[in-house]
Amino acid sequence: LVLGIESSCDDTGVAVVSTSGRVLGESLATQADIHAAWGGVVPKLAQEAHEAAIDGCVEAALASAGVTPDQLDAVAVTIGPGLSLCLRVGVLKARQLAAAHQLPLIPVHHMEAHALTAAASAASPAATPDLVEFPFLCLLISGGHNLLLLVEGIGQYTQLGTTLDDALGEAYDKVARLLGLDLRPSGGAALEAFAAGGDPRALPLSVPMQRRPTCDFSYAGLKTAVRLAIEEQAPEATEGNRQVRADIAASFQRVAVQHLEERCRRGVQWAQESHPQVRHLVVAGGVASNRYIRGRLAAVAQAAGLRLVCPPPRLCTDNGVMVAWAGVERLQLGLAEAPPASGEPGEGEWVDLRPRWPL
Ligand code: KG4
Ligand code: ZN
């Protein structure tokens, strides 16, 4: 049994997962209400909210699993990438638990956790039983990352593409804010819902980087084009310009996702040439909960003879299950650290955090 703790951004997540992949218990405290008022995540407020939530989340996850800390085999925790103030809260809690019960500690990379969860949830009995085997192609789309990877094993990643500026989730969040939407549960989810009532062809936006035949992404230019359109057509959000704003939202989404499709198509082609045994396109991270994106990428995968695999939407956004699951995989490979000395970490002590940590 592995207990996983996630606190890299604005969700405090804890879960207990068995080595067979069963989720025994979980708990999640989100901070959407706190940050919505500020139009984005405020690190200091996020830290305070994590501090207020962490003990209760750990207790709730253990209680719902019917497990005491002594019955655990290891504690896994996200040590990066993310906001250091926030990472620190989860890491301190994990180290205290591991020290008190002399459990091995497993440092987890947040994006690896997203990637492995998608593969694991596809293999769970609840979903279609379809084991995702290495190597697979993986698109990670979240608020801070936009990565296209060839995954050949745990810790074996070839980066085919990354963003040259913004991540897709960040672009969704910014456009949602410019359109004056209620940013709960997230800017991305709000924009997806709002765009459903708009005409995706209303605004003639150009697809980014069409003359650059790489797998890299760029969303800054598109974001600027959308900002200018909003300043011109709907500088203030009113009921009267609701349709105009919905049209802009839908147009942004269409073009942003077309860019994603084009890069994925190229990545798939490259991966199939170099690794003909690739069978799956795995898509994970908060933005992967978007139904429109899932539909479009399913078509890209299908056209290339691949299967699209996404975690269920609640496992796309940050949660404890993904960290516990990545911990299980690492534990099985013997990649755990010895339990911290009891009494450690003390107040103000140095702990290993990796706010910037390439995969
Ligand atoms: O993985 P995640 O929960 O946290 C990070 O690691 O960043 O992803 C959060 C991002 C946010 O930018 C949020 O707006 C976006 O995922 N997101 C969505 C949707 N749900 C969440 N973006 C587009 N459509 C959605 N339905
Ligand atoms: Zn994430």
Image (cartoon, grey):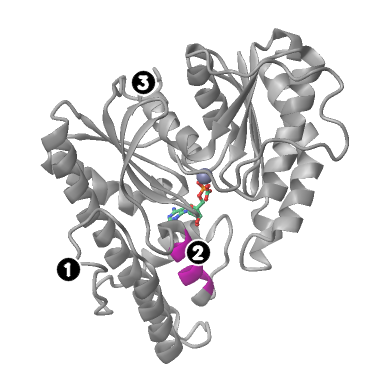
In the picture shown, does residue 47 fall above or below 307?
A: below
Is residue 98 visible in the rendered image? The answer is yes
Q: Is residue 320 left or right of residue 246?
A: right
Q: Quadrant of residue 242?
A: bottom left
Question: Is 3 or 250 nearer to us in this picture?
Answer: 3
Q: Position of residue 246 (x, y in %)?
A: 39, 74
Q: Position of residue 338 (x, y in %)?
A: 67, 15
Q: Position of residue 75 (x, y in %)?
A: 66, 21
SS at mark 3? Answer: helix
Distance, label 3 to label 1, CA atoms, is 39 Å
Q: Which region shows up in magenta? A: 170-177
**Pointer 2 or 1: first along the chain:** 2
Tell me the residue that label 2 is attached to: 173
Is residue 243 visible in the rendered image? The answer is no
Task: For the N terminus, give its image quadrant.
Answer: top right
- For marks 3 and 1, give the one nearer the viewer: 1
The answer to whether the beta carbon of the residue marked 2 is less than 8 Å from any atom of ligand 1 is yes
Q: Quadrant of residue 94?
A: top right
What amino acid type should be assigned to the residue bearing mark 1? Answer: Arg
Q: Residues within 10 Å of mark 1 (few under 14, many from 20)?
A: few
Tell me the residue that label 3 is attached to: 123
Q: Quadrant of residue 133?
A: top left
Task: For the C terminus, give its image quadrant.
Answer: top left
Distance, label 2 to label 3, CA atoms, is 31 Å
**Pointer 2 or 3: first along the chain:** 3
Q: Residue at x 79, y 25 (%)?
A: 96
Q: Residues within 10 Å of mark 2 (few under 14, many from 20)?
A: many
In the picture shown, does residue 266 fall above or below 116?
A: below
Tell me the residue that label 1 is attached to: 211
